[in-house]
């Protein structure tokens, strides 16, 4: 390659590779983010399709980047970070890339808790990149926030992300499926989790860029119960006098199956919420003494 290659040519090459996987609209967005964030090209130049020449550095790296995109590697792993609820988060293949529906869950929680945040301790169970805990601490700064994960590598990324976003969060390693964890787990007012909930039988319908690159333990639930972690958290939260609220991201599943794992004598206030696609993807359970 020579330095005579210009910006429109590079932009079109990226789209050509991405379009079969993502469609034209998303491919254009991928090309724009990649050029802005990895190579410092201005949004104005891209929008105006400026005929400016691109750097030797871009041309040198372009074949390798195109190869990774063509193989289906997510853009977020290529550039090394993602945006989540106005927070910049480092990501690599040890953590899931946060999804839009998780932002919707965070928004719901922030709206609920903003007025009483100074009284609250919050724990994010299965924190991954730290996206939920960090967004909550950023927008509920008076709350005490804890975050838990079973993976050392995930906790390392989450700790870095908390530092990047200047959020004071206490991190803890633990396995929610073992009783000993609940003995050491901080006893918080609010428990939140977006746990693994995909059944292994769903593999055949999943996109290859998810299966090939994102960490399986964060995607797939052990065994056959997609609500395994939800049940475990609700069981232990029910036994804690100060835990009055639990929020969850949900799999797309029959609502009656979800209701069956919630004890009405404990969780007297139950609310489901739909995502932007109109699917029930969020749940809030509260005890009777709750004021929310």
Image (cartoon, rainbow, N blue to C red):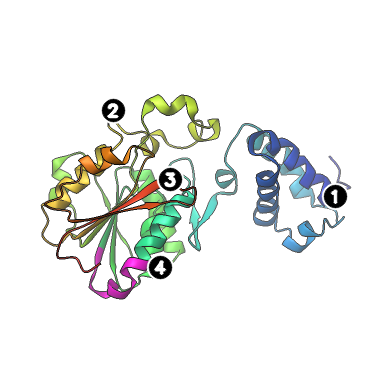
Badge 1 crowding class, 10 Å Cα cut-off, few under 14, some 14 to 19, many 20 or more, is some
Query: Which numbered disc flags the more N-terminal residue, 1 or 3?
Result: 1
Q: Main secondary structure of the magenta part?
A: helix
Q: Whole-Å distance between the Cαs marked 2 and 3? A: 22 Å
**Helix, strand, or loop for circle 4?**
helix
Contact (CB < 8 A) between labels 1 and 4? no
Contact (CB < 8 A) between labels 1 and 3? no
Query: Which numbered disc flags the more N-terminal residue, 1 or 4?
Result: 1
**Quadrant of residue 245 within the rendered picture:** bottom left
**Helix, strand, or loop for circle 3?**
loop
According to the picture, the residue beneath numbered tag 3 turns out to be 279
Where's the N terminus, which quadrant? Answer: top right
According to the picture, the residue beneath numbered tag 1 turns out to be 6
Q: At x 77% / y 57%, what residue is drawn?
A: 46
Query: Which numbered disc flags the more N-terminal residue, 1 or 2?
Result: 1
Q: Position of residue 150 (x, y in %)?
A: 29, 43
According to the picture, the residue beneath numbered tag 2 turns out to be 224
* Of the pair 40 and 145, the residue shown nearer to us: 145
Q: Whole-Å distance between the Cαs marked 1 and 4? A: 40 Å
Q: Whole-Å distance between the Cαs marked 1 and 3? A: 44 Å
Would you say residue 71 sits in the magenta stretch?
no
Q: Position of residue 205 (x, y in %)?
A: 49, 28
Query: Which numbered disc flags the more N-terminal residue, 4 or 2?
Result: 4
Task: Count all numbered tags in the image, as a single digit.
Answer: 4
Q: Whole-Å distance between the Cαs marked 1 and 2? A: 53 Å
């Amino acid at each position: 390659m020579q330095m005579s290659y210009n910006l429109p040519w590079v932009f079109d090459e990226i789209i050509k590779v991405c379009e079969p996987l993502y469609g034209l609209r998303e491919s254009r967005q991928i090309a724009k983010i990649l050029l802005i964030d990895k190579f410092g090209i201005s949004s104005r130049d891209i929008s105006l399709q400026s005929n400016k020449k691109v750097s030797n550095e871009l041309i040198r790296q372009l074949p390798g980047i195109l190869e990774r995109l063509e193989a289906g590697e997510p853009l977020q792993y290529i550039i090394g970070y993602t945006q989540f609820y106005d927070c910049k988060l480092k990501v690599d293949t040890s953590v899931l890339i946060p999804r839009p529906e998780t932002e919707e869950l965070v928004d719901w929680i922030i709206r609920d808790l903003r007025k009483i945040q100074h009284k609250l301790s919050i724990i994010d169970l299965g924190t991954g990149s730290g996206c939920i805990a960090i967004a909550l601490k950023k927008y509920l700064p008076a709350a005490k926030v804890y975050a838990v994960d079973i993976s050392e590598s995930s906790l390392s990324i989450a700790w870095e992300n908390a530092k990047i976003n200047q959020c004071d969060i206490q991190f803890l390693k633990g396995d929610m499926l073992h009783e000993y964890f609940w003995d050491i787990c901080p006893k918080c007012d609010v428990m939140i989790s977006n746990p693994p909930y995909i059944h292994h039988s769903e593999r055949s319908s999943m996109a290859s860029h998810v299966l090939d690159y994102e960490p399986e333990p964060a995607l797939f639930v052990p065994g056959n119960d997609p609500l395994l972690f939800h049940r475990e958290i609700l069981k232990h939260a029910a036994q804690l006098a100060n835990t009055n609220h639990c929020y969850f991201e949900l799999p797309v599943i029959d609502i009656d199956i979800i209701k069956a794992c919630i004890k009405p004598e404990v969780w007297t206030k139950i609310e489901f919420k739909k995502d932007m696609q109109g699917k029930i993807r969020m749940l809030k359970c509260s005890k009777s003494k709750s004021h929310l």
